Image (cartoon, grey):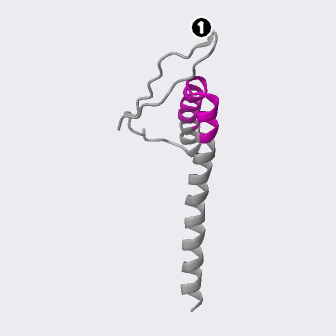
Amino acid sequence: MRVRVAKYDSLREDLEADHTVIEIIERIPEFTSMLEASRWYDEQAMKIADALQYALPQGTFERLIAELFRRAASLYKGQCLQGDAAGERMAS
């Protein structure tokens, strides 16, 4: 998938964002501990967040955050509904 969006455009030339490319190509490594996995996911998230915060216009970045929260909430809502339905079946 290739996605093209507008980059941050400053009125000052010295603040203009560079062309930013995020390549999602590596495989998730095998981890020897939950701590190792947690640190790896944290690092991956920070790299993406840093790149997007620097490269995107503020309005786009803010709306992206809101959309990501909306999607995450939908995932949790679906899990809760599935859990409720499972609980009802067990009670029957």
Q: Main secondary structure of the magenta part?
A: helix
71 in relation to 54, above or below: below
Residue sitting at x 60%, y 77%: 84
The C terminus - image quarter: bottom right
Relative to residue 39, is residue 3 drawn left or right?
left
40 in relation to 89, above or below: above
Residues shaded magenta: 42-63
Residue sitting at x 41%, y 29%: 23
Residue reaching furthest to the bottom = 92
Q: Nearer the viewer, residue 30 or 92?
A: 92
Relative to residue 22, is residue 60 drawn left or right?
right
Residue sitting at x 59%, y 34%: 60
| Residue 54 picture location, percent across and down | 60, 23
Q: Does 1 appear in magenta?
A: no
Q: Quadrant of residue 25?
A: top left
Residue reaching furthest to the top = 14
In the picture of the structure, the residue carrying the numbered disc 1 is 13
Q: Secondary structure at mark 1?
A: helix
Q: Quadrant of residue 91?
A: bottom right
Q: Amino acid at mark 1?
A: Glu
Q: Quadrant of residue 57?
A: top right
| Residue 3 picture location, percent across and down | 41, 34
Q: Does 45 appear in magenta?
A: yes
| Residue 18 picture location, percent across and down | 51, 15
Q: Classify mark 1: residues with Cα within 10 Å, few (<14), some (14-19) or many (20+).
A: few
Q: Nearer the viewer, residue 4 or 70?
A: 4
